[in-house]
């Protein structure tokens, strides 16, 4: 589904502080499975996720999504593809403070042009599924960490994406909430979505919910099983 | 089309929810903004309506008024002038007018005394303007005495009150019989204050004025268009004074609005990053910000303008009345006819809505073009 060929990514290229975050990544990620990128801080997990999720373009190499080369797409098309096909759950959740849980969930659908009542109904369904129906109108800063993460998951799913990307999803959760999150991930894979996450949490890496673990270090893949 | 409308609806919904998060800041800004539009629109509407009113009232004024000058001062028209004018071709009608000023020490105000050439006023009676009616507490059939400049006391009975709709120019008017007028001011027989002329062909007014100046070199012809221009410039001048006084407040608001609109907090920058990461395009972010600018400035413009309209045409412009109408003791009281100048509305709209919306956009452009992956790395 997602194919990366000789992908490299540099920051501050040409400057004295030039840094290669990814260095020759070759990777094929299958659909409908949960894939975990694992490795220490600075190993390139998050950078790889941004390239897979169309948040950034590789400095060199090719990235393909369902066979189509996306590494050279202009920003506008890349954004449309990102909105349609990818959902993101960030490490810090990145919810917009002051807005309600429902308003946050509906945000990615705003540029889609879908009727508001359709989006609202879908948001209500997702919040209900994630056991947050009773917190629908609560401002996100009033929610607990676990609730905030579930709002972030609902937001990631509002455009019904094929791929869910989660960056260090359990970093801010206790063990119970982390297990709960993994159960949710498993259900997504079960319904045909592709899940790609980064983590160095053993609970995630050793979980039965994760089908494939890719180990990274210094911007390279060191182990894939 | 439906998709576009739904997109804009969603953007407006988010903008409103976003504005509601900083209620105190945005309501404060909206209140100051609305007040500014209200003040500017009130001044513009009031002045325009006054100019319009003056034009309407002066529509029936004579095309030319002839005054005699002595040593650069206005003097009485002596006998024989009417005959001389009668020989100028194009003059359709002429009449000697009798009017003068009287200072009333009781209320410390000047009245204009006048003897209408058409007559219709009995000896010993007067017809008065509405301001006089109010200030001196007069009514029909009540009596009033004026002490002439000779020291002699003259008593009159009020026969009628002039209509209120002409109060802008008749507030202080006292109409009386010609004989009473001449006796009161010791005005010599055959003399007049000035001469009013009607011209058959309006295109010829300037030619006839030139002929009058030739035939009567000690006289000054005053054209109706000049009177209208004078009224217009008086009201424009007063409008200018009010705006000059307000300019400090306007400048303060511009600085406040620019600061509020152009300053982008770290929180707002972070939010723009999130929106881009979850699938908003740069254009969506900019459109959302345009809506924010438009919603604030358009609301302020509409509310301020409607409030100004009600203030001027329903409440009589109470806040600016003393400055814009004049400084006379006898203030005219009249209902201004609702009159809106499209160009003035467009100008006010342009100078209130457009700069604010532009000020909102300037910092957004840079923030909205940041890479969406910045959110992942923060």
Image: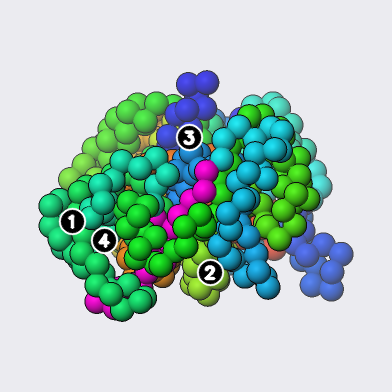
Q: Of tags 2 and 1, which is closer to the observer?
A: 1
Using the image, name the chain to which the residue with label 1 belongs. Answer: B
Main SS of the magenta segment?
strand
Residue drawn 65% across the image and 64% down it: B69
Q: Earlier in the sequence, mark 4 or mark 3?
A: 3
Contact (CB < 8 A) between labels 2 and 1?
A: no
Judging by the rendered image, the residue that carries numbered circle 1 is B157
Judging by the rendered image, the residue that carries numbered circle 4 is B132
**Hey, which quadrant is residue B156 in on the image?**
bottom left
The local crowd at label 2, few if under 14, some if 14 to 19, many if 20 or more residues have their Cα within 10 Å, is some
Q: Secondary structure at mark 2?
A: helix
Using the image, name the chain to which the residue with label 3 belongs. Answer: B
Query: Which stretch is magenta?
Result: B95-114
Judging by the rendered image, the residue that carries numbered circle 3 is B8
Q: Earlier in the sequence, mark 4 or mark 1?
A: 4
Q: Secondary structure at mark 1?
A: strand
Q: Of tags 4 and 1, which is closer to the observer?
A: 1
Judging by the rendered image, the residue that carries numbered circle 2 is B241
Q: Earlier in the sequence, mark 2 or mark 3?
A: 3
């Amino acid at each position: 589904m997602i194919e990366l060929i000789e992908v490299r990514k540099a920051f501050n290229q040409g400057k004295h502080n030039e840094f290669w975050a990814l260095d020759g990544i070759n990777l094929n990620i299958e659909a409908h499975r949960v894939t975990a990128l694992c490795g220490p801080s600075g190993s390139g997990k998050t950078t790889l996720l941004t390239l897979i999720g169309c948040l950034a373009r590789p400095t060199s190499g090719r990235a393909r999504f369902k066979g189509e080369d996306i590494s050279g797409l202009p920003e506008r098309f890349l954004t449309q593809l990102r909105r349609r096909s990818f959902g993101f759950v960030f490490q810090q959740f990145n919810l917009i403070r002051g807005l309600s849980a429902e308003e946050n969930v509906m945000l990615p659908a705003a540029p889609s042009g879908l009727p508001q009542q359709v989006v609202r109904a879908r948001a209500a369904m997702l919040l209900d599924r994630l056991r947050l129906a009773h917190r629908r109108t609560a401002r996100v800063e009033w929610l607990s960490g676990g609730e905030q993460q579930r709002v972030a998951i609902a937001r990631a799913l509002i455009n019904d994406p094929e791929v869910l990307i989660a960056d260090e999803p359990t970093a801010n959760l206790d063990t119970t909430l982390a297990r709960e999150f993994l159960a949710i991930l498993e259900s997504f894979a079960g319904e045909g979505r592709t899940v790609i996450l980064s983590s160095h949490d053993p609970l995630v890496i050793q979980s039965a919910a994760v089908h494939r673990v890719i180990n990274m270090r210094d911007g390279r893949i060191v182990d894939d099983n | 089309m439906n998709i576009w409308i739904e997109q804009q609806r969603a953007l407006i919904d988010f903008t409103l929810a976003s504005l509601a998060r900083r209620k105190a800041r945005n309501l404060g800004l909206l209140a100051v903004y609305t007040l500014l539009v209200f003040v500017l629109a009130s001044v513009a509407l009031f002045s325009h309506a006054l100019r319009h009113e003056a034009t309407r009232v002066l529509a029936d004024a004579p095309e030319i008024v002839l005054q005699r000058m002595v040593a650069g001062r206005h003097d009485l028209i002596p006998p024989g002038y009417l005959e001389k004018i009668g020989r100028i071709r194009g003059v359709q009608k002429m009449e000697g007018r009798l009017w003068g000023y009287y200072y009333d020490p009781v209320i410390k105000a000047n009245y204009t005394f006048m003897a209408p050439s058409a007559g219709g006023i009995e000896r010993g009676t007067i017809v008065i303007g509405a301001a006089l009616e109010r200030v001196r507490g007069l009514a029909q059939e009540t009596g009033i005495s004026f002490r002439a400049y000779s020291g002699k006391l003259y008593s009159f009975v009020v026969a009628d009150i002039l209509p209120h709709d002409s109060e802008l120019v008749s507030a202080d008017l006292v109409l009386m019989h010609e004989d009473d007028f001449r006796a009161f001011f010791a005005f010599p027989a055959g003399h007049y204050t000035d001469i009013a002329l009607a011209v058959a062909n309006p295109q010829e007014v300037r030619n006839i004025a030139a002929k009058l100046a030739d035939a009567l070199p000690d006289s000054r012809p005053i054209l109706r268009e000049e009177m209208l221009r004078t009224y217009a410039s008086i009201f424009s001048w007063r409008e200018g004074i009010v705006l000059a006084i307000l300019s400090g407040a306007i400048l303060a608001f511009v600085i406040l609005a620019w600061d509020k609109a152009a300053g982008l907090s770290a929180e707002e920058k972070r939010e723009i990053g999130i929106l881009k990461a979850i699938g908003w395009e740069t254009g969506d972010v900019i459109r959302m910000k345009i809506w924010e600018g438009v919603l604030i400035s358009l609301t302020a413009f509409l509310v301020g303008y409607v409030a100004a309209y009600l203030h001027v045409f329903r409440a009589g412009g109470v806040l600016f009345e003393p400055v814009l109408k004049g400084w006379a003791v006898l203030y005219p009281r009249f209902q201004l006819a609702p009159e809106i100048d499209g160009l003035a509305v467009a100008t006010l709209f342009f100078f209130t809505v457009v700069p604010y919306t532009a000020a909102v956009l300037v910092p957004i452009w840079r923030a909205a073009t940041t890479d969406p992956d910045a959110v992942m790395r923060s």
